[in-house]
Image (cartoon, rainbow, N blue to C red):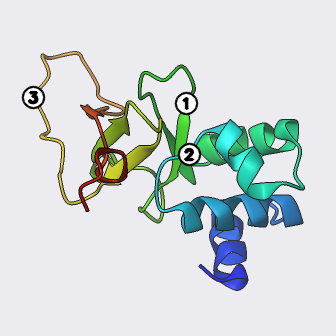
Amino acid sequence: MENSKCIEKLTRKGIKPTANRILVLETLLAAARAVSVQELEIMLGTVDKSSIFRTLTLFVKQHVVHTIEDGSGSLKYEVCSGEDSCSVADMHTHFYCEICHRTFCFEAIHIPVIALPEGFAMHSINYMVKGVCRECSGSK
């Protein structure tokens, strides 16, 4: 996503588009997979970990990104595809590679929506498949 589109997305979400926020959003979009704070810190290089964490916290609060728990011990962050908020449609299947510790998004594999008992309200769904990714298994 080009710089102006990132600025537009942040502004639409009520977030002041600072240089760091734009850079974090651009990096998340370019990654095309769910990434941790530590991975973002390596990808960005010039932005300190606390700034990245504060930016991600704001992005989660304003529904720019959603979090994924993949069992690795650190949350992964992914940009919401919806314009207004993260929806159940954003909660697609994820794959965690037990060798390289990357989390991949399988957007074409949707999570089935289940009917919850009366009085329960769903906010998110986490469907994680664990195994070995294509690169680590050596099969392209």
Residue 28 in sight from this viewpoint: yes
The tag earlier along the polypeptide, 1 or 2, is: 2
In space, the residues marked 1 and 2 are separated at their CA atoms by 8 Å
Q: Nearer the viewer, residue 72 or 136?
A: 136
Report helix, strand or loop for mark 2. loop
* Image vertical order of residue 89 relative to residue 120, above or below: below
In space, the residues marked 3 and 1 are separated at their CA atoms by 27 Å
Question: Can you give x and y, in whole percent of width and height, for residue 28 in the image?
Answer: 60, 58
Q: Amino acid at mark 1?
A: Leu
Q: Nearer the viewer, residue 36 or 124?
A: 36
Residue under numbered circle 3: 115
The tag earlier along the polypeptide, 3 or 1, is: 1
Report helix, strand or loop for mark 3. loop
Residue under numbered circle 2: 35
Residue visible at 84% across and 59% down? 20
Residue visible at 55% across and 49% down? 65
* Image vertical order of residue 69 relative to residue 137, above or below: above
Residue under numbered circle 1: 75
Residue 15 in sight from this viewpoint: no
